[in-house]
Image (spheres, rainbow, N blue to C red):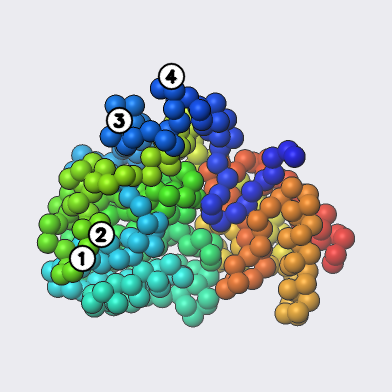
Amino acid sequence: MSRVFNFSAGPSCLPEEVLKECAAEMLDYQGSGQSVMEMSHRSSVFKPIIEHAEAQVRKLMKVPENYKILFLQGGGSTQFAMVAENLGIKTGKAAYIETGVWAKKAAAEAKALGVQVDVIASSADKNYSYIPRVEKITGDYDYAYICFNNTIMGTHYEYIPDTGNIPLVADISSCVLSEELDVSKFGLLFAGAQKNLAPAGVTLVIIREDLITDTPRAGTPTMLTYKTHADKESMYNTPPCYTIYVLGKVLDWIERNGGVQGIHARNVEKAELLYNYLDTTPYYHATAEKGSRSLMNVPFLTKETDPEKAKEINNTFVKEAAAAGLVNLAGHRLVGGMRASIYNAMTIDGVKALIAFMEKFAKEHF
């Protein structure tokens, strides 16, 4: 079977040339006679792999020297707790902007751990279809928290809130390395790998060194303390070695393709193609409001308004799309319809193939 266009929200498609490189080295990594999957993380062969991955993150994201780069486990969801336990330690208060499921879950986790959570803005009134405009955040907060790109709702911050001396924390899981980001404006950034970085299994954390404490909230487990991992260069215990290896190769691929600036230009081109079609066709429409739209995740609905008929036609769309080699287009239940995730590795040809299918499907079913 030939390769399909994978529009999954995660785990997502990876660059084909990276997959081929990994396949070529599966049984013998650079003459070591073993796969990265099976080598010791303490070995002299693996050490350059993790050092290279860290160096590439620092170079491509222009990470300042006073920030630590960590490769952790537990996915983005574990960061909901780690952020609260490690940063919510002075006043015990934090400001959250609620823009969807993941920001809401992060706030709930912090609250459960004893942090006083103030939801200072929310877009729940319109089913999280936009990003609230909060230009400045003030108060005696230990940190402020945002989810920079909302995978389910297809929304994205087009600005960075000014938090002054309050450390700004951002979940960038579904937009990491899709655009240039000024790391110095954040106290902590984190990203699960399975959207733009690598297969699921490693979580990238970029944290300002002054936020790494040896006195987190009482009862914080050793493994959920940033200092534990910072002191041991992400190797306090066995890290997800193979995922880190793939991550390094993906970063090399980004560098070969013009770096973050080049990837962003390609992402803009892909998104504009799809949104322009959605905004001009009578058959479909995007659910996210203009001014808040994600370049990575594009939910859309058909013109069918009857709930039962819409459900039936959505199912038909997803089934016929898969038969045409366009897979994982089902929308999330909270939005409905369809969703095309067009991460860094998705090609322009893939987006063009989707639009051609959408037009064909519309003529046949509407």
Is residue 313 something one can see in this rendering?
yes
Image coordinates of residue 319 in percent, x first then y, are 76, 59
Q: Quadrant of the C terminus?
A: bottom right
Q: Quadrant of the N terminus?
A: top right
Are the two marked residues, 2 and 1, in contact with CB atoms closer than 8 angstroms?
yes
Q: Amino acid at mark 2?
A: Leu
Q: According to the image, label 4 marks what residue? A: 31
Q: Secondary structure at mark 3?
A: loop
Are the two marked residues, 2 and 4, in contact with CB atoms closer than 8 angstroms?
no
Is residue 257 something one can see in this rendering?
no
Q: Amino acid at mark 1?
A: Thr
Q: According to the image, label 1 marks what residue? A: 220
Q: Earlier in the sequence, mark 3 or mark 4?
A: 4
The residue depicted at 14 percent of the width and 57 percent of the height is 213
Image coordinates of residue 339 in percent, x first then y, are 63, 60
Mark 2 → mark 4, Cα distance in angstroms = 36 Å
Residue found at the far right of this picture: 364
Q: According to the image, label 3 marks what residue? A: 43
**Please, is residue 212 above or below residue 254 in the view?**
below
Q: Nearer the viewer, mark 2 or mark 3?
A: 3
Residue 330 is tagged as none
Q: Secondary structure at mark 2?
A: helix
